[in-house]
Image: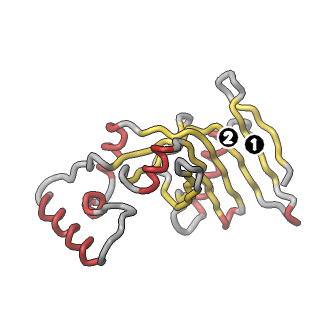
Amino acid sequence: MTHDPFALFDAWYAEARASEPNDSNAMALATADAEGRPSVRMVLLKGHGRDGFVFYTNREGRKAGELAANPHAALLFHWKSLRRQIRIEGAVTLASDAESDAYFATRSRDSQLGAWASDQSRPLDARATFEARFAAMETRFAGQDVPRPPFWGGYRVVPERIEFWQDRAHRLHERRLFLPDGAGGWSEGLLYP
């Protein structure tokens, strides 16, 4: 049994990648605005390591506004087929431009164009308006690589708390909690189910 939360995450994530039928990298992202009103949505994990857990989005949308006002978030991975979940809480920082550029370059061309065409989270009068904006981006970037929009990039949740939850019979679940130990490592404890 590992006592390193990042090694344990890697092991559980590898199992999920092998067994989950769709989007094993899907995670619920919870944020709160300046008044503390919560909001949650699904996003995709696109990078992780000891420095944190990374996702990408439009930096002018609702979640970005909430993160600007309150730069803390919670993540939840739920892998139903494995009967496991991982909860991560921590401060949020921006991923570097270089990191955001590198990830953006791996996206499909249509996803890249969609990032330019979308005013994420803002009202849309009709689907045809978005489709017309997408077509305009196809024309604008015809015959060239699509650069990352200046308003689009990554966020990193730097963990301050990581909990691993494993389903057990009769709701006698196992909960392992990892907290920073103050010396650059992590301490581990258990929580009642």
- The residue positioned farthest toward the front in the image shown: 35
Relative to the observer, which residue lies in front, 143 or 61?
A: 61
Residue 153 percent across, percent down from the top left:
36, 46
**Residue that label 1 marks:** 177
Q: Secondary structure at mark 2?
A: strand
Q: Quadrant of residue 94?
A: top left
Residue at 81 percent of width and 39 percent of height = 189
Report crowding for label 2: few under 14, some 14 to 19, many 20 or more residues within 10 A (C-alpha).
Answer: some
How many marks are shown on the rendered structure? Answer: 2
From this view, report whether residue 180 is shown above or below residue 90. Answer: above
Relative to the observer, which residue lies in front, 137 or 169?
A: 137
Which badge, 2 or 1, comes first in the chain's sequence?
2
Residue 20 percent across, percent down from the top left:
58, 65
From this view, report whether residue 183 is shown above or below residue 53. Answer: above
Residue 181 percent across, percent down from the top left:
72, 27
Residue type, numbered disc 2: Arg
Relative to the observer, which residue lies in front, 111 or 131?
A: 131
From this view, report whether residue 46 is shown above or below residue 129. Answer: above
Residue type, numbered disc 1: Leu
Residue at 78 percent of width and 60 percent of height = 167
Residue at 32 percent of width and 37 percent of height = 98
Relative to the observer, which residue lies in front, 185 or 134?
A: 134
Display coloring: secondary structure
Q: Which mark is residue 161?
A: 2
Residue 82 percent across, percent down from the top left:
69, 62
